[in-house]
Image (cartoon, rainbow, N blue to C red):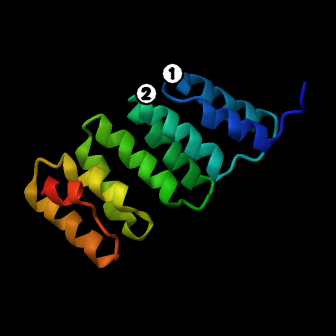
Amino acid sequence: APKRNRILCNSLISACGAGGWQWALALLDEMEADSLQRDLWSFSGAIKACGKAGHWEGALILFFSAQALRLEVNEVMISSTVSACAKASRWQLAFLLVASAPQMSNAFSFCAAISGQKSWPLALHLFRMMSQTSVEGDLACRNAL
């Protein structure tokens, strides 16, 4: 059997998908227990798995855990977390995530947060933020307004 390392664990976490979000979390815990450094890709893969399964709470916990470990948050991590919140109709959380780090948000993050807003002023605010950060929204994003 191959020796477990960070790259192997990250690949396994990324492969978990919606049906394996518990496995992704277990692998993340095992990495910590085995003193393997968990990185941005470890957390991003687990956040994606949680999001695909509709487990938005797990995605948020992982997002904030990564920040607590002083991992540099990137577009992949924030868009996966926003997507998890949006998929579960947690629009205020999606809004807050994008609003707290607009420079790290991509078109997908903005559009996910805009599309379900029940408050048109918040949706318009996100749209303006998107324009100020030079993120190009697609037609679906513009139609969400």
Residue 38 is situated, as x and y percent measured from the top left of the image, at 70, 46
Residue at image point 59% right, 44% down? 43
Q: Which residue is drawn at 35% across and 61% down?
A: 107
Q: Which amino acid does label 2 sit on?
A: Ala
Q: Please state the horizontal and vertical placement of residue 111, each as a whole percent of the image.
A: 28, 55
Q: Are marks 1 and 2 in contact (CB under 8 Å)?
A: yes
Residue ID for mark 1: 19
Q: Which of marks 1 and 2 is nearer the N terminus?
A: 1
Question: Relative to residue 56, is residue 109 depicted above or below?
Answer: below
Left or right, 19 with respect to 99, comes to right
Quadrant of residue 121 within the rendered picture? bottom left
| Left or right: where 141 falls relative to 106 | left
Residue 7: percent from the left, percent from the top? Answer: 77, 44
Q: Which mark is residue 70?
A: none
Labelled disc at residue 53: 2
Report the amino acid beneath label 1. Answer: Gly
